[in-house]
Every structure is written in structure tokens, then in C-alpha cells.
Amino acid sequence: MKSLRNKADVAQRQRMAQQELSTDFLNHALEWRRIFAETWGTFLLVVAAAGGEVVAARGDGAVTPGMRAVAPGLMVMAIIYFMGTVSGAHLNPAVTLAFAVRRNFPWSRVPGYVLGQLAGGVLAALFLRVMFGTIAALGATVPGSGIGNGKALAMEVLLTAGLVNTILGTASGARNIGTNGAIAVGGYIALAGLWAAPITGASMNPARSFAPDLVRGNFGTTWIYVVGPAIGALIGVIFEWILKGRPTAAGAIAAQGARGSDDSTNA
């Protein structure tokens, strides 16, 4: 009996969240708020990710490799908490692509989200350039010493597939989001950075890599950090389909944000 009541409570919360999603976050008049959230959130993420490299170079190693690896994960965790309910806190074109392919997110909103993410990343790179000049290549992600382009591409595919699985996995259940999602996604990004940053910079995010390359005017390896995350995102969606089956209403709520619902935050 208790189990049936719990299931009924979960279903009722999903219906309430879906109703709010329909009346609020599918409201085209509020799209500017969601795009602003993506722009601001991606700005903060790129400042932390690229800025760690810049400050480390300027501070003679005061910011250690471990600190630089963990900082983006902690920043993403904080962003999910404070604005996940506004836009879904994608912060990454590969994540937006994954949610759209998974049919949790309308394709018509993808261009606005991606443009907002790219704008936030470029503004962050410009901020770092104004503050510190062009040291450390503005925190650009490039293959490590002795790592060829093919290996770097394979690593970005692998890392992004795992990231997308983590994000979609925490978005697919009514209660496996919010706090758990923030910790899981932020923790994955930190863990990926700890072991894979020396290989590729552990970007997993075209906006994070494109922005410093644009501002410094060097696109020699940019394609790796666009193609790799895109392929990884598609693989992550396929794996999610194998693991969980059809997309869920909770996943759609998490992808788009559902402000005011306790069970609707995701990255």
C-alpha cells in the first residue's frame, strides 16, 4: 500500500511539473530569460575552466593541476543549483544536442541555446584577455605532448559520451535530479579533468574550447573539440536509449527547466 502511495505521489508531482512546464517554460515570451541563463552560466564555466590555466601561468603554479581539474566541476555544480530550474543549465552545445536528439528538448530552441552558450564562452575569453593578456593561450584546450589528433578526438568522444550518459541518466527519473544531478554531473566533470586533462584538456564542450581559440585567433585543433563532443553526445544518447528506453517526461522537464518544481533541476 505504501509503495502504491509513493508511486501515486511521484506521478502527481510529474503531472504538476509538466503542467508548469507547459504554461511557463514553453512560453516563447520567456525565452530571453532562458538564453540569458545559458549565456551567464557558460560565461562562469569558461571563466573557471580557462581561467584556471591562465591564473596558474600567471601565478607560477599557485593553482595546481588538481585545482584546475576540479574547478569546472564545482562551478557546474553551483550553476545547476542556482539556475538549473530556469534553463536546464545545459552550458554546452553537446548537451543541448543530446537533449534534442533524445527528444527531451524542442529543436526549435536549439539555435538560441547554442548561440547563448557560444556568446557566454567568448565573453569569458575576452574577459580573461582584458584581465591577464594572452598568457597560457587564454586557457585553450589542445592535445597534450605526444598526443596525435586522432587520439585526442577519441578521448573527447569517450569523455563526452560519459558526460551525456551522466546528465541524461540523472534527468530520466522523477527524483534522480536536483541535488543528485548537480553532484553527479559536477563530480563527473571533475573526475574527467583529473585523469584526462593532460591528454586533451578534458573539454567535452565546444563552447569552452571554441571561445579561447576565437579570441586568440588559432583554430588549428578546434575541430577536435567540436567533432569529438558532437559524436560523443550522439553515442551517449544511443547508450541512454539502450539503458533506459524511451524518453521520459521527467527528462523533458530537466532539459528545459521547470522553475518552482522540487523535482526538476538538471544540467
Image: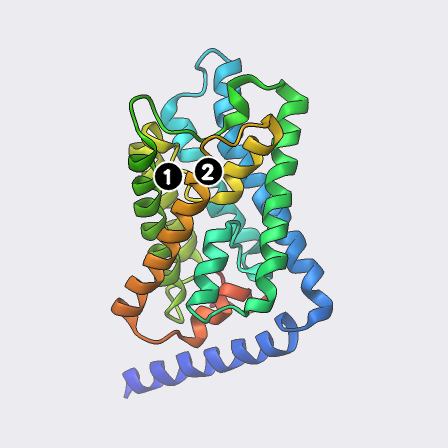
Q: Nearer the viewer, residue 206 or 265?
A: 206
Residue at image coords 50%, 49%: 92
Relative to 151, residue 242 above or below: below
The image position of residue 106, as x and y in percent, is 54, 70
Residue at image coords 42%, 52%: 230
Q: Nearer the viewer, residue 206 or 222?
A: 222
- Amino acid residing under circle 1: Ala
Position of 224 with respect to 210 (left or right) is left
- Amino acid residing under circle 2: Pro
The image position of residue 221, as x and y in percent, is 45, 33
* SS at circle 1: helix
Residue 22 lies in quadrant: bottom right
For disc 2, the neighbor class at 10 Å (few under 14, some 14 to 19, many from 20) is many
Residue 132 lies in quadrant: top right
The image position of residue 264, as x and y in percent, is 49, 66
Position of 111 with respect to 196 (left or right) is right
